[in-house]
Amino acid sequence: MSELQARASALAPRRARDGSQEVLPRGPLRRWGGFFLCILLVCAFVFLVAPAIQRLGAIEAVHANTRDHGIDATGLIYSETKEFSDADGYIRDAMKY
């Protein structure tokens, strides 16, 4: 594909949903827009969705129980086997007694 054909295809008209033709930009502005949209979606998940999930019934009970008993739950997040084993044992014991 020649350079001229590549430029022509980048600016080729595309059909919109209503049937009209429009030129959609494919330059750096669109790529940066996509990047910032992804960053916005990640932030929305971290600060809105994840805390909302944490407040759901069963998950909230486990979270409150873990916090109230002072259990270090970092072993549940990280892949260190010993910490996971300790945290798992503490949580199981706290839920039983």
Image (cartoon, grey):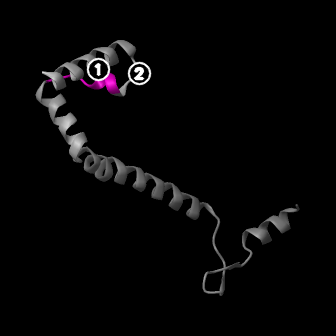
Relative to 90, is 44 above or below? below
Q: Residue at x 51, y 61 (%)?
A: 33
Q: Quadrant of the N terminus?
A: bottom right
Residue shown at 41% from the left, 21% from the top: 79
- Callout 2 secondary element: loop
**Would you call the spot at circle 2 few (<14 residues within 10 Å), some (14-19), or many (20 or more)?**
few
Q: Is residue 76 above or below residue 50?
A: above
Q: Which residue is mark 1?
A: 88
Q: Which residues are magenta?
A: 70-76
Question: Taking 44 as reference, is 26 above or below it?
Answer: below
Looking at the rendered structure, which numbered label has been put on residue 96? none
Res 95 quadrant in image:
top left
Q: Tell me whether the residue at label 1 lies in contact with that at label 2, contact meaning CB atoms closer than 8 angstroms.
A: no
Residue found farthest to the right: 2
Identified at 36% across, 50% down, the residue is 45
Choose between 1 and 73: the one closer to the eye: 73
Does the magenta-highlighted stretch encompass residue 24?
A: no
Q: Which residue is mark 2?
A: 79
Q: Nearer the viewer, mark 1 or mark 2?
A: 1
Write down the quadrant of residue 96 in the picture: top left
Amino acid type for the residue under numbered disc 2:
Ser
Front one among 42 and 49? 49
Taking the image as shown, residue 14 lies to the left or right of residue 37, namely: right
Check disc 1 and give the amino acid type.
Answer: Asp
